[in-house]
Every structure is written in structure tokens, then in C-alpha cells.
Amino acid sequence: MSTILLADDSPHARRMGERILREEGFEVSSATDEASARACLAAFDPDLVIADVFLPGGGGLELCRHVKNFHRHVRVILTAGQLEPLDENEARAAGCDAVLRKPFEASMVIGTIRSLVQEAKLARGLFAEALAAVPPVPVSDAPGTVAAPAAPDPERIQAAITLALDAALPNLVREITEKVLIALGH
């Protein structure tokens, strides 16, 4: 089951978001501020974070930066009301994957969420494959002895990394292009 962290200080927005997401088959955890959102990230390990830009305790932009630095597979959608100021270039520079304005058009939101969750699951799976390519350290049965670690197979590791890079490259190119355009003021 796909997992989503919904971080919004509005009780109404959280209730509505939780209901819609659960009806679509997602597992949902909610947070009301940046600190509780960070705690949920560690405990819940979601595929996607939907965060209000004006989240108390640092805001959605700061939460997005944290996610992109420490939870690389997780995708982030930043939200704001129609009349709330939101610099979309700054949001992209923080690493967000999409920006949505409230009130949401449900079908568009669900389409955006589904594609980002798929990207996150792919990234999570590819990184897991790369880690699985490294053989486990053998455990010795004799008390008080430590077994020497098995030598990793460089070809398997290289193959796993190549698969991960092939899958991640299109998104990486898109992210770098957006950041270059922002830096150039376009």
C-alpha cells in the first residue's frame, strides 16, 4: 500500500485530505507542524509528503528541503491557498516535485499524487536493489569469534547502480534543468 504524509495545520484540510486519500486506497498519516511531520517521516517512511507552505514551525519549504536531503526517495507536493503568496520558483529550488493550489480539483490532484507515488516506489525499489546487491556479512556460530566479511561482488553492485541511475536519470535531468532555469531567472 502506498503511504502519504499530509502536513497541514488546518483541521478541515487534514480531514478532507485524509478522507479523499484513504478512499483512493492510500495509507495516510497526518501532522500539524514541521516538527511532528519530521517525526512522522522517521516513523512512517512515506512515499509522498503533501505539505502546506505555511506549516507552523519552519514551513513547508523547510520540510521539503529536509525531505530532499534525508529521504531522497520521498516525493513532495507543496500546497497553498489561492490568495496565499507562494513563489513557485522558490518551491522548485527547495526540491518540491509539484505545487498545488487550494481548493483542489480532485481528479487533477489524484493524478499528480499517483504519478509521484509511482516515482517514489521506483526510487525506493531501486535503492533497495542496490543495497541488496551487497552480500550480507556472514555470522559465525562460534561464541566470541567474528567472521570476516564476504567480499562484495563489484559486478552485481555496478549492475544495481546502473539500473538505479537509468531509472532516475530522466527525473534528475528535469530537476537540474529547473534549477538552472531558476538560477538564470527564467
Image (cartoon, rainbow, N blue to C red):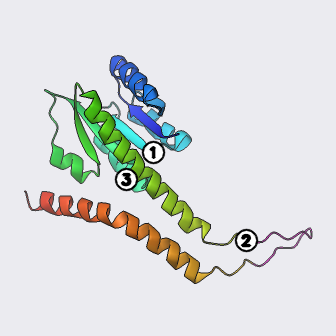
- Coordinates of residue 7 in the picture (x, y in percent): 38, 32
Is disc 2 placed on a helix, strand or loop? Answer: loop
Q: What's the CA distance linking mark 3 and mark 1?
A: 12 Å
Task: Examine the rendering and report whether any part of residue 52 can be seen.
Answer: no
Rendered residue at 81%/76% (across/down): 147
Residue at which label 2 appears:
137
- Coordinates of residue 137 in the picture (x, y in percent): 73, 71
Marks 2 and 1 close (CB-CB < 8 Å)? no
Residue flagged by tag 2: what amino acid is it? Val
Q: Is residue 143 magenta?
A: yes
Is disc 1 placed on a helix, strand or loop? Answer: loop
Rendered residue at 41%/49% (across/down): 118
Residue at which label 3 appears:
68
Magenta-drawn segment: 138-148
Residue flagged by tag 3: what amino acid is it? Lys
Question: Residue 133 shows which numbered tag?
Answer: none
Residue at which label 1 appears:
47
Residue flagged by tag 1: what amino acid is it? Asp
- Residue that protrudes farthest toward the top in the picture: 12
Between circles 2 and 1, the one closer to the viewer is: 1
Q: Is residue 166 magenta?
A: no
- Coordinates of residue 39 in the picture (x, y in percent): 50, 38
